Image (cartoon, rainbow, N blue to C red):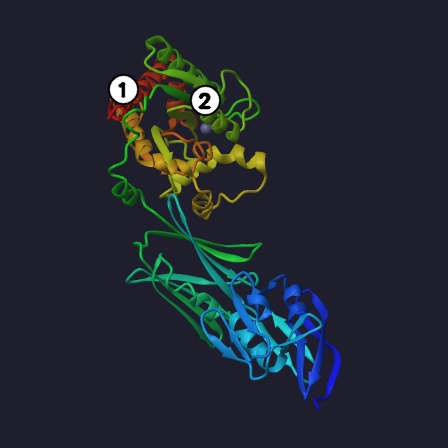
Amino acid sequence: MPVIKASEISLQMAGGVEKISSFSEDGITYFSMSQLASLLGDRLDWERAGLSIKYKSDRNELIFFIGSPFIRTNDSVANITYPAILRNGQLYLPAITFIQVFDRIRIEQISWNENDKIIRFDSEWYTINDLTFSPKANGLLIEIFVSGPTNYEIFPSDGNWINITIPGGTINQRQILSHKSSEFLLDLNAYQLDGSAQLSLRLRRQIGKIAHRFQPSPDRIQISMIDTLASIISNKEDESIGPDKLIDRIILDAGHGGSDFGAIGQKSSREKDIVLDIAKRLAKLIRKEKIFEVVLTREKDEAISLQDRTKKANDEHGDIFVSIHANASLKKIARGFQVFFLAPAKNDSARAVAQLENAPFLSETGPYNVDENDEIGYIISDMIQTEFQVESADLAAMVDKEFRRSLAETSARGIDQAGFYVLNGVFMPSILVETAFLTNREDEDLLNDKDFKQKVAESIYEGLKRFKAKYENN
Ligand SMILES: [Zn+2]
């Protein structure tokens, strides 16, 4: 005659301690799996006319057979020595053996303390919990989920390996290695060393530029492989704007306005006035010839957020977006025109221009990450217009060529790429033109000269027509 004692055991989790009904039979403690599943937020369902019960969580499926010690786990069978018991409509399992099986399949470390009658869920035990891959329009984002702020080191090695060392880390090898067959990987290793953990990923793609940062809630290390322009061009050779697509609507964006003066010259010229003047001259040229239609993001001296500018461009279904600016530098000798398209900045000076032009965005939305890790914010934002990166680079080159032809008074600084928020989210080929430097005395004079401003407008216009000729119906 078995000795049966009804009582309770404790479930200890991050959220506190819960009670679960239990009984012991011949010295073996059984607990209610029905109650445990419900506390975990998982499902327990009857199967096959009451012969078996299925447990289902996000990642796992277990099938219990009443009266049998065998359990079907995700892809194999386990033996818990003592049978699953149905009692008062609940499924009871032997704690001493089942908790070991449960520990193997769950992410958390789970243990059974026979003396204290406690099932302990210790999700804090590992500090490196999981890994995800997210393909983005302009690269690949890898996220390593950790249990709190942590130091780490990242170093690439030959053969497209990326190695991440986390000092003091405890790695959940089972969970991490479950991604070994990821479509993005050729190989994956997870090592628990004394005093540190190491993760090595061998990627399928060529490792180009890497950016990384720690990001809270949830705590994770983000690593992005940013596709270089060269790789984008080589991947997109067949693509063009499309045979039936007319390029007939230009969005002109005069930078700054209202309380945002933009750059200010030594003679107090204000960027917001000069660029509006140039935009209006260009609009007039466009309206005269009627090859294109034109929409201005602002026609007077008013403050418009960068978001509203891009929204207007998209709402008006523009085919090309041109943002007009004048540059500034602490180096008063810096001068010349430069044409930018949107892509991660490749050098400090391009990044500096982007920071200058992004400044209104910062003041509008509060703190936002535009330090040197800006690129990772950029890759994460899933920017659709990387679709137009090749076209944008081409347009920048065309406008630059026209500038070189007609703006001999100042110098050519070339085309470059940087992360401008005003271009971010514009679903069309887009460029940002820095006409000349307001902080340079000669350039400032030019920017106040109506002939020069007219030539800037004409040059951009010629560039737009060349672009149309190349991409439309082609
Ligand atoms: Zn500006």
Examine the image and state in which quarter residue 349 appears: top left
Label 1 amino acid?
Answer: Ser
The amino acid pointed to by label 2 is Glu
Residue to which mark 1 is pinned: 406
Query: Would you say residue 140 is visible in this rendering?
Result: yes
Marks 2/1: CA–CA distance: 31 Å
Can you say whether 94 is above or below 459 in the image?
Answer: below
Q: In this view of the protein, can residue 412 be seen by the observer? A: no
The residue that label 2 is drawn on is 316
Can you say whether 280 is above or below 205 in the image? above
Q: Residue furthest front?
A: 49
Asked whether, in this view, residue 307 is left or right of residue 85, the answer is left
**Residue 232 image offset from top left, x and y in percent:** 30, 42
Q: Residues within 10 Å of mark 2 (few under 14, many from 20)?
A: some
Question: How many other residues sit within 10 Å of disc 1, few (<14), some (14-19) or many (≥20)?
Answer: some
The answer to whether marks 2 and 1 mark residues whose Cβ atoms lie closer than 8 Å is: no
Q: Secondary structure at mark 1?
A: helix
Which x, y percent locates residue 265?
46, 25
Which residue is situated farthest in the top direction here?
Answer: 288
